[in-house]
Image (cartoon, coloured by chain):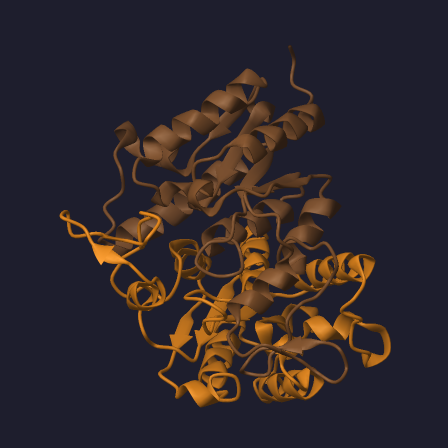
Chain colours: A brown, B orange
Amino acid sequence: MASMRVYLAGPDVFLPDPLARAAALKAICARHGLVGVSPLDTLEGGDLPEWSSLDEAYRIALRNEAHIAGCAALVANLTPFRGPSADPGTVFELGYMRALGRPVFGWSNCAEPFAARSRAFCAGAAAQPDGTWRDAAAMLLEDFPGMADNLMIDGAIAASGGRLVTRATPRAAAWTDLTAFQACIELVARALDPPE
Amino acid sequence: MASMRVYLAGPDVFLPDPLARAAALKAICARHGLVGVSPLDTLEGGDLPEWSSLDEAYRIALRNEAHIAGCAALVANLTPFRGPSADPGTVFELGYMRALGRPVFGWSNCAEPFAARSRAFCAGAAAQPDGTWRDAAAMLLEDFPGMADNLMIDGAIAASGGRLVTRATPRAAAWTDLTAFQACIELVARALDPPE
């Protein structure tokens, strides 16, 4: 059953009750024949990390890497996090799994395209004479039609055989609604084709 | 000389003259016996990408992945980009190279710790009774002493044998000053030990 393990990347670990959240995600995985692996699984006894020690941070990073390496696929919560893009820890993990050559999937509770989100986020962003947009530091805004985030993210998901599910969700439900996650897990299950 | 190739990850590709920027980074690499590889190198004839086609985005993503795979190390510009963290495309690439088991390095023109940056960025962030900080969505702010960004980033650099160079730089020079980059490249050269 090792091949049915799916790493659940996302800033969900920062939620007020991350163990309950992990349990909810794993329950949905289990209903589709998959074993969801949470970053919190790596902690002995289910204890939460101490967010105070640099050594602890390094240990968490290595444990997350080991967990990814032990999974057949990765599912990333790409809901925009403190800016126009996904949580950077999640994006790191997506890149890590992509390099291992296994399928990476994403889901997001925001359906607004990346370009529109970036324009809204960047105060002072302006259209240029050539039609592109640049921010106040004159740096280009990516503007590919239909992209959900930076092209490395969308590109990796597509190239790996994964899928990206986005769903317009009220902002207040951005970190609670699991409809897009469930739809994504259905696609993961179909791709990995676990035994009944 | 293939082992002396170093991938130059960063949002530098979004600067007004990205080819001039790539040339400046490569010149510093060359002075240290390294061959800097820019994401823009992947484009035939040095042309800039069309930022308008989804197929083009996917092609760029695959070319960047291939370039990373062809390098002995990765050096990431982790200067905060449109939020408290580094550019997500850069972070993806860092994770990708980390999974390949080769050293990853970072540099940043911001020396403010990640925790302080996150508190400043998140309107409504507040200290909790237990001493942790949470944002307006009640999501935890990482607070490890000395961390430059998300723990996956700092952790990967440390575990890979790489180094992270941060340097306080005036905001106006955040995308022009190459002092931290040069210091980082000196460390890369020492780590890879290229021939004289």
- Where in the figure is residue B168, as x and y percent of width and height? 35, 83
Q: Nearer the viewer, residue A118 or B84?
A: A118
Query: Is residue A182 at least partly visible in the picture?
Result: yes
User: Considering the image in quadrants, where does the N terminus of chain B appear?
Assistant: bottom right
- Where in the figure is residue B96, as x and y percent of width and height? 59, 54
Q: Is residue A195 above or below residue B32?
A: above
- Where in the figure is residue B115, as x and y percent of width and height? 30, 63
Q: Nearer the viewer, residue B83 or A75?
A: B83
Query: Is residue B179 at least partly visible in the picture?
Result: no
Which quarter of the figure has residue A102?
top right
Q: How many numbered badges does the structure rendering display?
A: 0
* Outermost residue toward the top in this view: A196
A39 displayed left or right of A109:
left
User: Considering the image in quadrants, where does the C terminus of chain B appear?
Assistant: bottom right
Q: Residue at 67% of width from left, 52% of height from top?
A: A154
- Where in the figure is residue B59, as x and y percent of width and height? 79, 59
Q: Nearer the viewer, residue B131 or B31?
A: B131
Q: Residue at 62% of width from left, 33% of height from top?
A: A184
B129 displayed left or right of B139:
left
B86 displayed left or right of B131:
right
* Outermost residue toward the left in this view: B129
Q: Is residue A85 above or below residue A187?
A: below
Q: Residue at 68% of width from left, 50% of height from top?
A: A156
Q: Residue at 49% of width from left, 85% of height from top?
A: B182
Q: Is residue B156 above or below residue B46?
A: above
B178 displayed left or right of A45:
right
